Image (tube, rainbow, N blue to C red):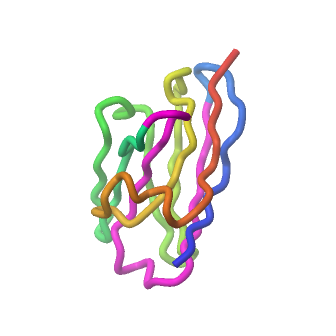
Amino acid sequence: VQLVESGGGLVQPGGSLRLSCVVYGFTFSEQAMGWARQVPGKGLEWVSGIYIDGRTDYADSVKGRFTISRDNAKNTVYLQMNSLKPEDTAVYHCGPYGAPTHAYNSWGQGTRVTVSS
């Protein structure tokens, strides 16, 4: 199993980014997927999840600003992040939704998001 995250970068507060995660090694359409983030020196924090039927869940800290989606034809899960805040700065990882949050950095390198003016 390999997950390849991309789309991170440096953005000003209030800006937007779209993260992507391409999945290799399991049947993507049969797996709920999620995103978690890790601030350097701290543990992983769950951010969002999407079920195979499209239902979504969000952490309170990102609700109304982030949108998770999936494209089964491309084996890809996305995280659209709007109205970014400095506290959103972290390395973002994707993973199977339902896996322990602390395991989300096990399958890929993650993508770094920095929100700063």
The residue under the point 71% across, 38% down is 9
The location of residue 86, given as percent across then percent down, is 55, 21
Q: Is residue 23 above or below residue 63?
A: below
The residue under the point 41% across, 44% down is 44
Q: Is residue 38 left or right of residue 102?
A: right
Q: Is residue 73 above or below residue 97?
A: below
Q: Please tell me in which quadrant of the rendered image residue 108 appears.
A: bottom right
Residues 25 and 103: in front is 103
Does the magenta segment cover residue 28?
A: yes
Q: Please tell me in which quadrant of the rendered image residue 95 appears.
A: bottom left
The location of residue 30, given as percent across then percent down, is 35, 80
Does the magenta segment cover residue 64?
A: no
Farthest front residue?
41
The residue under the point 67% across, 22% down is 12
The location of residue 70, given as percent across then percent down, is 46, 64
Q: Is residue 73 left or right of residue 8?
A: left
Q: How many marks?
A: 0
Q: Is residue 67 above or below residue 10?
A: below
Residues 37 and 65: in front is 37
The location of residue 8, given as percent across then percent down, is 66, 44
Residues 47 and 110: in front is 110
Farthest top residue?
117
Image quadrant occupied by the C terminus = top right
The magenta stretch spans which residues? 16-42
Q: Is residue 52 above or below residue 14?
A: below
Residues 19 and 98: in front is 98
Q: Is residue 84 left or right of residue 114?
A: left
Q: Is residue 26 left or right of residue 84?
A: left
